[in-house]
Image: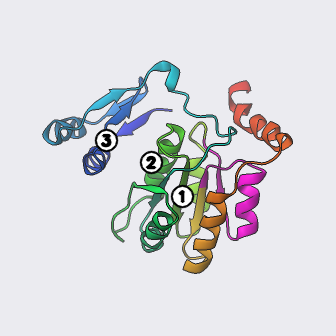
């Protein structure tokens, strides 16, 4: 799946002081290339051996969390940013940065790509209902996105399904429930070997068919 690097990606990298990681499937827009020169942002090609990213079924300590939202989830994202930081995690905010109307797949892909590349161990994406963002995130290889409405689902998503991206619906759940779901999701590791075996079947299906 080809990845598009646009002006927003370059400006985000400049704000965070990081390089933009690319590979042979990356397309850089002309505006992004020009802006990168102005801001001193580098495009760094990832080695072929690194391009597959981390195995989501390998239990990792969560240190970095990437958050994203569309306009419907913007307000809740802003609340959760502070909450996730208060838990001791480093946070990457990939937007959106206002309540102006935008397309949820753009930001779901940013969250999923950051997790797939190993820049963050977990991702959280918020739109109005959460379903569309889960569909989008699950298109990215190596991502297991789960939409959760309560802590039972959040625990199961991690323990049984090794989910590495959580999607939330801002119109479905309140701020307090969102915090509890996020807390459980980030602190629950993957479970027994039988669950890992089953999840690997999901991850390998597209390659085998």
Q: Secondary structure at mark 3?
A: loop
Q: Which mark is residue 18?
A: 3
Instruction: Write the start and end of the magenta stretch as one range.
Output: 143-165
Furthest residue to the top? 48
> Against 159, is 72 above or below?
below
Q: Are marks 1 and 3 in contact (CB under 8 Å)?
A: no
- Is residue 97 positioned above or below 105 on the image? below
Q: Nearer the viewer, mark 1 or mark 3?
A: 3
Residue at 24% from the left image edge and 40% from the top image edge: 32
Q: Which residue is mark 2?
A: 110
* Left or right: 73 as drawn, with respect to 96: right
Task: Determine which residue is flagged by label 1.
Answer: 124
Q: Quadrant of the C terminus?
A: top right
Nearest-to-viewer mark from 2 and 3: 3
> Alpha-carbon neighbours of circle 2 within 10 Å: few (<14), some, or many (≥20)?
many
Query: Observer-nearest residue: 88 or 139?
Result: 88
Instruction: Point out the tag, 2 or 3, that comes first from the N-terminus.
Output: 3
Q: Position of residue 207 (x, y in %)?
A: 68, 26
Q: Name above or below for residue 158 compared with residue 140.
A: below
Q: How far is disc 1 from disc 2 in space, using C-alphas? A: 11 Å
At which x and y percent is residue 194? Answer: 86, 41
Instruction: Label 2: state its secondary structure.
Output: helix
């Amino acid at each position: 799946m080809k990845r598009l690097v646009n002006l927003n990606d370059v400006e985000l990298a400049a704000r965070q002081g990081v390089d933009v990681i690319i590979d042979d499937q990356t397309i850089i827009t002309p505006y992004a290339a020009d802006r990168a020169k102005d801001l001193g942002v580098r495009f760094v090609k990832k080695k072929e051996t690194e391009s597959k990213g981390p195995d989501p079924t390998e239990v990792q300590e969560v240190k970095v969390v990437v958050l994203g939202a569309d306009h419907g989830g913007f307000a809740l994202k802003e609340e959760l940013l502070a909450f996730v930081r208060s838990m001791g995690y480093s946070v990457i905010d990939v937007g959106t940065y206002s309540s102006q109307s935008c397309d949820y797949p753009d930001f779901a892909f940013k969250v999923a790509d950051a997790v797939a590349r190993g820049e963050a161990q977990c991702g959280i994406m918020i739109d109005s209902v959460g379903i569309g963002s889960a569909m989008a995130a699950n298109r990215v290889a190596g991502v297991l996105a789960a939409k959760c409405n309560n802590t039972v689902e959040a625990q199961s998503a991690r323990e049984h399904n090794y989910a590495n991206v959580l999607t939330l619906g801002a119109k479905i759940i309140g701020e307090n429930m969102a915090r509890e779901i996020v807390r459980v999701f980030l602190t629950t590791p993957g479970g027994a070997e039988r669950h890992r075996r089953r999840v690997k079947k999901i991850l390998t299906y597209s390659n085998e068919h």
